[in-house]
Image (cartoon, rainbow, N blue to C red):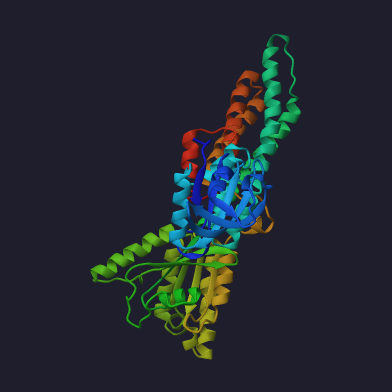
Amino acid sequence: MHNDTIVALATPSGSGAIAVIRLSGNEAIAIVSQVFRSVSNKILEDQATHTIHLGHIIEGAKTLDEVLVSVFKNPNSYTGENVVEISCHGSQYIQQEIIQLFLRTGCRMATAGEFTLRAFLNGKLDLSQAEAVADLISSDNEASHQIAMQQMRGGFSSEITKLREELLNFASLIELELDFAEEDVEFADRTQFKQLIERINFVLKRLIDSFAVGNVIKNGIPVAIVGEPNVGKSTLLNALLNEERAIVSDIAGTTRDTIEDEISIGGIGFRFIDTAGIRDTADVVESMGIKKTFEKIDQSQVVIYLFEAAVMANESEKSTAMQIEIEKIRNKYPQKPLVVVANKIDQLSKEELKNLSVTFSAVQKPLESELAKSHFLKLSAKTGKGIEELTSALLNLINTGALRNNETIVTNSRHYDALLKAFEEIQKVQYGLQTGLSGDLLAIDIRQALYHFGEITGEITNDDLLGNIFANFCIGK
């Protein structure tokens, strides 16, 4: 299957200035040479690798397009095979005409991710690097791009490969001991082996813990904006997005379904969810919206509780009720960072602002003593005052220390699962060393740990696994 020549559009489908059509396979250059006529009469097969040539794609007496043809000869190409990339004009008609011509000339259409699959099979990338290619293509903020680039360059796989090699050396010595079992000899220094296992444990634990950060960076951080009706939730969403995304009205209960949109703050993707106002209502549709509000709070990782500043500034009875409501939210979702926001401060007098600050301080102290990740802010969603402080507070809730320090961060759930399994086996090995377990039983646990390490980088693989991984790629990559 992987000995034939494949072709696909490497740029997004649709009309544009330029489109790139990619071919890969041992016959790729020869196939293109049949239909390419260089303006300087060059023979494509005689040209050096990594060269570009101007000419025309010809079908019989018909000229399809003027193109640039880039030649990459094996093994110095992305796939490790002969690769040709044709830059043609971006007309959809031209794209399809050229691709159909190559299909008639001996190529077949590439499947999803097949170019990268061939790069993996030909040793140009390991499996974790290949998966990082898909992450890089789908990255939509600075942080996810940074992580994907690090992984594609081999930062994660090199760390795993180094540990696997060291463990494999000791495994070989222990296996050797089994061949000399009757002579009661030890080839593997148990003290050094214990130190290695402790180091592996430490690294695995760090990588496993990094998944919590990596997952939210990769998928975006869902933030639920909740509160009573007409407190300015939709206005806040519009202010954060800097566009009129949600309908704003003075009529309470305008938002009856959730509205979501995503922005990047400090390189991290945040997905804001504007929810229906929470209140007792007889309206069936509004009640359904409120029910969905609580579902969205369950799914979110951060909660913004919004209320009208005037309530705490002037009305003592309502202020007390508001404090109870904040306490309820905090108690119901103790693990979620809570950002309490007083909105509409543009409507307050100086005296009311002063009263608000006093009341806010009283609410803030008991909450902060029990939940470190609580923030209390005052803003005007209408004028934009205080929005920058809110975005800074949201960014501070995310542990980006590992990202700033350029540490390896795990974002792939398959890698996370393999790391968990490897960690479990390494702990068995550690326990076995502490209790003086026999070499043959130690060897079983070490083999299992090595297996799970190999799953990550692709030393251990199967067709089903590869099929699942590369099915998620786009055609042409």
In the rendered image, which quarter is residue 286 located in? bottom left
The percent position of residue 93, horizontal first and vertical second, equals 43, 60
Question: Which residue occupies 44% across, 61% down?
Answer: 92
Residue 213 makes an appearance in the image: no
Q: Residue furthest top?
A: 182
Q: Measured along the vertical axis of the image, is residue 203 above or below residue 136?
A: above
Q: Nearer the viewer, residue 289 or 216?
A: 216
Give the total number of marks visible in the rendering: 0
Question: Which residue occupies 58% across, 39% down?
Answer: 26
Q: Residue furthest front?
A: 61
The percent position of residue 146, horizontal first and vertical second, equals 62, 57
In the rendered image, which quarter is residue 170 located in? top right
The percent position of residue 403, horizontal first and vertical second, equals 64, 57
Q: Nearer the viewer, residue 310 or 238?
A: 238
Question: Which residue occupies 33% across, 66% down?
Answer: 290
Question: Which residue occupies 44% across, 55% down?
Answer: 96
The percent position of residue 281, horizontal first and vertical second, equals 27, 71
- Horizontal side of residue 285 vs 368, given as left or right: left
Q: Nearer the viewer, residue 335 or 76?
A: 76
Q: Nearer the viewer, residue 460 or 380?
A: 460
- Horizontal side of residue 111 vs 416, given as left or right: left
Residue 292 makes an appearance in the image: yes
